Structure formats: structure tokens, C-alpha cells
Amino acid sequence: MPIIAAPVVTPEVPETPPPVDLPEIGYASVTYVDPTGTRWPMTDLGADWYTLADGVSGLGAARYTLTTDPHPRGGERLRHVQPQARTIVWPVLVKGADHMAFTANWRNLARAFTRTLRLGPDGRRTPGWLEVARPDGSARRIAVYYRDGWDGRGQTATGINWDSAVLTLWCEDPYWLDLQPQTVHRETGAPEDYLVPFPTVSSSQVLGATTVTNPGDVDVWPTWIITGPATSIAFTRDDTGESFTLDMEATAHGPLLAGETVTVSTDPPRARSGTGENLITGLNFPEAVLWSIPPGETPVVFQLNGAEAGSSVDLTYFPRYETA
């Protein structure tokens, strides 16, 4: 049965403010996106608020804790490497045409950062995003939570129509994400008639053997979206042999029908139908390994049983990087 690879559609990149020279990363345009999706340009020197480049830090490589064991012949041997949460120091100047305009800007920007600590309707906190765009159009972002620093300088003449704050932003994941996702799509073609034009055999499985390229610096944990018909789905990382299987017949949902979808997240481990049903019971634990994709090229095989025309598999991930 033929496999059709669909083209990848590149989403539009939002407009970014002018670039400025920032410590550790050079010329870049920075935008803060608050939990509501509102975009706050941070490097437009003509705006009523902008980043003070002098004092910015925490945009370089992640910090690591090394666990070592003493070696009987001297020295130590590295046993484990643990990346640590990142802290970004971000000085901001806020101003206004008069005192009330300044006060409104100060309050609004403070709310945009501190609302990352508020619980949403789903009982969870939503981070903000610090986006760093380069002059060539490439961009990376990192999820941030406000920690402290929105205090003002408390000096003479500040607080009337201008003031500055030195924010500390906490990042639970120390790595930067590409704004553009990497996607691999495989879809079954129309089945062939057994006798037209020659005797032909069509498989009941979609077999996808491909090489996935991760251009980032560290491992990524992909998301898989499967579109039916399908009865079970197996995913294998060919270089290590790690694999997992989602057996739809082992769930209350039953086999995927035409047009129905299921999304498998590898971090955190999760399997949900298109209507929100929890299908985690269909994963073949404890044998299942929801594997990651390391930097470079990785051979991957995925297989759908009970596939027909229209059955498809989409692998999606955002490359992760050490620096902005």
C-alpha cells in the first residue's frame, strides 16, 4: 500500500520589534507573550517600555549538576548529569507621557508578568513566553514564570513618569524551543484492486520507516497524532529498539473509525482521543518506552494495524536548544 508524505506548512512568524544588542546572545528582537496571549515588545526603544540591555543575564547555556563517584586510581568519574531550572534576570524601563500614563503602563506590565503565578480555570498556572528573534527571521522561546523584582528603583524623580524594575524570571525547563515545529506525516494511499491492471496484494497495515532529523542541541519528546481507521499503533526507535504500542481494542473506545484521532504525548505520558477520552490503558505498560529523539538523525518505524485509505500518522516536535 503506498505511503503519502504531505508537505509541511510553515506558520507565519509574528511581527517582532527592532533588534538590540543583548549580553550573551548579540543582536536580537525580544517579545514577551503573557498567559492571555498578549504580545509585549521588549526591545522597541521607541515604546513606553523596553529592556535595559545592561544587566540582562541567564540567556546562555543551561546550568548542570554533575553527580560523580570517586575513582580508586584518582580523580572522579561522571555518573549522572542533571540540567537545572534556569533563572533569567531582565531589567525593564517603563515610562509614560505623564504620571497617569506611566502608572497605567507600570500596572499593566506588572500584571502581564505576575499573572503567570495565578491559577487558571483548569486549576493550573500558565507560563509566559520570552521570544528571541534573530535578524534572519529564526526565533526561539522559553517558558517563564515571574519570581520577583517588580519593585521600582525607589529613588528621587522615579515613579513620576518613569521607573525601572529588575525582574527575575524562573524557567522550569532550561532549554529554548524553536518557534517552528518539525513534522513528519505518513498517510495510506487508496487500496488497489486485486485484478486491475495485474494481480496485486494490498496490506492492512501502514508501515512508516523514515529518518527523523532533530536539528536541536538536546533530546526532544515528540507528540504523535493518529487518524483512523486503525486498531493498534506501534512506534519503534530503530537504533535502540525502544518501542511502545497503543492497542485501541484494549480501551473502552475501541478501534479508531475513519476520521477519528488519538494523540499520544511522550512527555508527559498521555493518550487522548479527539473527544478527550483517556486512552492510557491502551499503552503496553510496563514494556512500553515512550522514547525521545536525540540530536541528529534517528531511524524511526511506525505501524498501524487495520489501516485503510485515509489512515495517517503525524509526528510533531519542537527542537530544543541550549541558548537563545
Image (cartoon, rainbow, N blue to C red):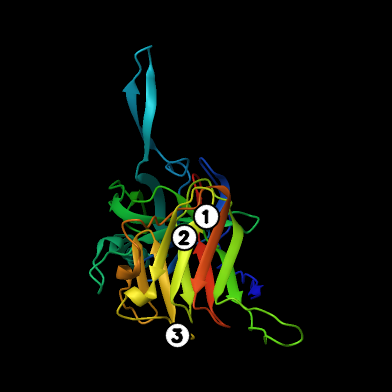
The answer to whether residue 90 is above or below residue 17 is: above
Residue highlighted by disc 3? 257
Q: Amino acid at mark 3?
A: Leu
Residue appearing at x 71%, y 87% in the figure = 195
The Cα atoms of the two marked residues, 2 and 3, are separated by 24 Å
Q: Which mark is residue 153?
A: none
Counting labels gives: 3
Q: Which tag, 2 or 3, sits closer to the chain's start? A: 2
Element under disc 1: loop
User: Could you classify mark 1 by the number of other residues whose Cα lies within 10 Å: few (under 14), some (14-19), or many (20 or more)?
Assistant: many
Occupied quadrant, residue 191: bottom right
Residue highlighted by disc 2? 222
Return the x and y of residue 266 as percentages of the image width and height. 40, 60
Q: Amino acid at mark 1?
A: Pro
User: Could you classify mark 3 by the number of other residues whose Cα lies within 10 Å: few (under 14), some (14-19), or many (20 or more)?
Assistant: some
User: Could you classify mark 2 by the number of other residues whose Cα lies within 10 Å: few (under 14), some (14-19), or many (20 or more)?
Assistant: many
Return the x and y of residue 107 as percentages of the image width and height. 31, 64
The answer to whether residue 232 is above or below residue 269 is: below
Q: Which tag, 1 or 3, sits closer to the chain's start? A: 3
Residue appearing at x 55%, y 77% in the figure = 204
Q: Amino acid at mark 2?
A: Pro
Element under disc 2: loop
Please state which of the two labelled residues, at mark 1 or mark 2, is closer to the viewer.
2
Q: Of 260 and 106, which appears nearest the observer?
A: 260
The Cα atoms of the two marked residues, 1 and 2, are separated by 10 Å
Q: Which mark is residue 319?
A: 1
